[in-house]
Amino acid sequence: MTELAFSSLADRKPVKVDLNGTPVCVTRIGDEVFAIADTCSHSEASLSEGDVTDFKIECWLHGAEFDLRSGEVLTPPASIPVETFEVKRADNVVIISSRKSAKG
Ligand code: FES
């Protein structure tokens, strides 16, 4: 798992964090925080460099859009969803962890 400060996250401005060697795109929307794989499933661009609209993030390279809540592809050219990560928040502390390791 990895931690960051909620106060360090600007609304709809994704950041890339490292989770045990995996780049994760963390996005704050209002009081909520979402974490998906940072690597676009299309051609490996960094999703945290993309634009956020509603609950969507748009890959800057070819324009694929992903749902920040589910990792689902909303717009081609990507066709494979990206992994989502568990987010817990306690006041100013945001904890990101893998769903896989949470299941053991
Ligand atoms: S690398 Fe993201 S849409 Fe092509």
Image (cartoon, rainbow, N blue to C red):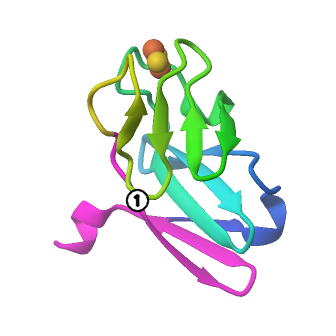
Compared to residue 69, the image places residue 24 above or below, namely: above
Magenta part of the chain: 82-104
Q: Is mark 1 within 8 Å of ligand 1?
A: no
Query: Hey, which residue is sitting farthest bottom in the picture?
Result: 91
Amino acid marked by disc 1: Phe
Q: Position of residue 25 (x, y in %)?
A: 56, 45
Number of residues whose C-alpha sits closer than 10 Å to that of mark 1, classed few (under 14), some (14–19) or many (20 or more): many
Q: Residue at x 39, y 21 (%)?
A: 76
Element type at mark 1: loop
Q: Residue at the spot x=55%, y=60% of the render?
A: 34
Is residue 1 among what the camera can see?
no
**Above or below, 95 relative to 70:** below
Q: Is residue 5 magenta?
A: no
Measured as percent of width and height from the top left, residue 75 is found at: 43, 28
Query: Toward which corner of the image does residue 39 lie, by quadrant?
Result: top left
Decide if residue 71 is on the left or right side of residue 18: left
The residue singled out by tag 1 in the image is 85
- Tally of numbered tags: 1
Q: Is residue 88 visible?
A: yes
Q: Nearer the viewer, residue 46 or 81?
A: 81
Please provide percent x and percent y for residue 24. 50, 45
Query: Split into 4 quadrants, where in the image is the N terminus?
Result: bottom left
Q: Nearer the viewer, residue 3 or 34?
A: 34
Residue drawn at the location 46% of the way across and 58% of the way down = 69
Q: Residue furthest left?
A: 104
Residue 91 inside the magenta-drawn segment: yes
Give percent across and percent down for residue 15: 68, 45
Quadrant of the frame with the C terminus: bottom left
Q: Out of 88 and 68, give the one closest to the viewer.
A: 68
